[in-house]
Image: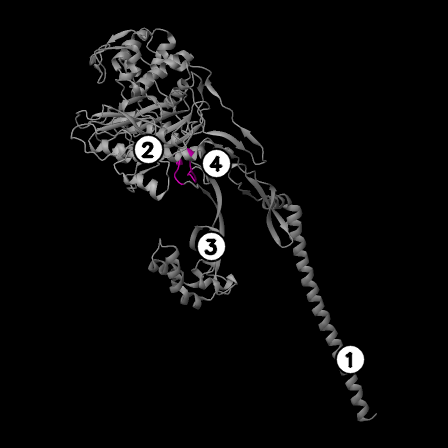
Amino acid sequence: MNIRSLTSIFKRKKKKNEAKTRRRHIIKRYSFISGCILFVSGICVLFLLNTTVIHADEWNTKGDKTMSDSILIKPLRGEILAADGSILATNLNYYNVRIDFHASRINELKYLESIDSLADTLAHYYPYRTRKQWYAHLHAPMDKPKADRSRSYLLLKHIPFDEMQRVKNFPYFRRWRNPNRSGFTSERVLLRRYPYGSMAQLSIGRVGETKENPEVRGISGLEQALDEMLYGENGVAKKRMLTRGSSYWPVKQPVNGTTITTTIDITIQDLLEHELGEMLMLCKAEWGSAMIMEVATGDIKAISNLDRDTVGNRGYIEAMNHIVQAYEPGSVIKVISMLTALEDGYVNLNATYPIGHSYAYAGGKPIRDTHSPAYLPVSRFMEYSSNIGMTKLIAPHWENNLNGFRERLKKIGFFDKLSTGMARERTPYFPTLDPKAGGRVSLSRMIFGYATQVPPLYTCAIYNAIANDGKFVRPRLVKAMRRPDGTDSTIEVSYVRDSICSPRNARILREMMHSVVWGEGGTAKGLKNNIVTIAGKTGTAGIALERPRTKDGKIDKSVPFKGGYREGKHNRVAFCGFFPYENPKYTCIVVISDPQGPYGPAATSGTVLRNLAIKLYSRGLLDNSMDYKENPVASTTPTLYGTQKPERASILHNDLKLTHASILRTSNAKTSPSTVPDVTGFGIREALVRLEEAGLTVHFKGTGYVTAINPPAGTPVAPGTKVVATLSQN
């Protein structure tokens, strides 16, 4: 065997050994890998057994809990509408504009370069910050490390859609269509808005979050009183597994709130707020409150509550709903006291009582009259607002049953909750009297409006019943509702009592209130006017001291409190009445607290009511024509009233070519001093100028030109003398 053969045999053996070695290594590797797989599989099986068998109940509970996570879907709050459908409260979409400084492709260098121009633009459109302040606000995030910068840095809050679009087109944001480059983001939020601002704010109410309830719910007025209906019902969305993760899926849709239609008349509300505000500024009062309601239906057409702004010095603002708060009513309660006396049948209207200036009843502090003569018939007690007369008439009737007077008022529904829809409505308070603890004296004070507390709402409601022939209609602020499904429901007119007095006694009371304004000794005779006949009653009461309160508004019982009234001349004055007297359409109450200077109830509260009545008449809202002339006089030729300027006739004849114009009178004669000028034939404007130049107080009757004057022309008179001019179209 040669060497070549041996070499070949050796190579074959070597290759065979190498193949065996490789095979052994491969088997080892496969064995190791298979062992690892088996080991891992064993662990998985153990975990699977642990999850699905040993601790199955625990993991099932956790799974169910995770998949049962749910969130509330907020409903759309119902709207509040005025009587004519005008929106008083609604929901509008607004936007918060933010910058995301963690946007994937935001260009920080370009942002820093644009801060100057962006600050200029923002300061121009949103000047509540200066340019310097906007620059600091925009630059503030860049002073922080990149990781600490906000993903939702607030730029503008609660702006409307058009403004959001404008901001989106500012040069920096407009440079890139992709918001990942600019960081621009917008967030839509739904907010409660009131198109008429502060008008009837306390009656309509407001929404907000409270400590007790973090949700946006009603916190005052109708928003609070009808919150459950306005809010609606929350929907529910539960977590569901989807192809790419999980998400919340609605399982119960929200039910939107009910739309409420109120009785508020926007025109009357505007007039009432204006008149009340003007009077408060004139007499520098502490606060004022007024309400007007429709006699037949009880619809509250307007409510205004204005308090002096002692913080922001903004004049008078809506702060507290005094209409539903209880105060000592003063003499306006006399009408209600007289109502009970008439109904109980112990009143002789023709009986005359001695009045005087002082009367000590039951050993109490003497009752005083400042308006009444020595003797006065019952029929004129209201006219002179006689405290003594009312006490002598009514108090003896209840001497043996001191709480009978209170029970009598309860019988007519005076203490029933009216449920008008206004939040925090209080009922009248008449204390229980004890004959051994000055009960007789307290009774005498109750009769004319002291020692008791009555919300103006209740006084107005009773007066409205008197104007309505005794039918005690329930005041209401809501007259209809529209549910989310579109169904409408109307709230019918309801009555606290079908009748609180006979029509005859209601008529007697109306006549008494008429004499308050139109009688010779009427405490409100300054409210006479030739346009609307008003009937009502004045009232004055001292302002009681209030108990000290803590910062959260609760009574502080740790501070001693004696009670009593404010020292000095501090009164709360009121006037409650109805108009027109001949056919009452509206009842109104006006209460003004602490007017400064020589202002009584007629000059303040009564004047607000009178001015409101005249303005309602001028707008045709008292079932009248807006034209003062009921029957326009047909005429084929124009009439030129008397004038001191004869050139006016020339204008008609020569310039306007009115050849058929007839000249009634022209005069430029001088009038002797201290005599009544001759204004016969003059129009009302020129007649008024001439008479007032003579220092006279002028009253007009009729329409057209002056046909007669009393005292006659040429009569010697003193300055301030009243003259009555009669006007006619004939």
Quarter of the figure with the C terminus: top left
Query: Label 3 to label 1, Cα distance in Å?
Result: 84 Å
* Image quadrant assignment for residue 555: top left
> 701 or 138: nearer the eye?
701
- Mark 1 falls on what kind of element? helix
Q: Is 719 on the left-hand or right-hand side of 415? A: left
Look at 63% across and 43% down and name the residue there: 57
Q: CA distance from mark 4 to mark 2?
A: 24 Å
Which of discs 4 and 2 lies nearer the camera? The answer is: 2
Label 2 belongs to which residue? 276
What separation in Å lies between label 3 and label 2 (alpha carbons)?
Answer: 39 Å
Q: Position of residue 572 (x, y in %)?
A: 28, 26
Q: Is residue 516 on the magenta stretch?
A: no
Task: Indicate yes or no whether the magenta region holds residue 198.
Answer: yes
Sequence-wise first label, 3 or 1: 1
**Rounded to the nearest whole Å, what is the CA distance between mark 4 and mark 3?**
27 Å
- Segment tinted magenta in the rendering: 197-211
- Residue highlighted by disc 1: 16
The mark nearer the N terminus, 4 or 3, is 4
Disc 3 residue type (three-letter): Met
Looking at numbered disc 4 in the image, what kind of residue is underneath it? Ile
**Labels 3, 1: front one:** 3
Task: Name the residue beneath numbered marker 4.
Answer: 80
- Residue designated by label 3: 164
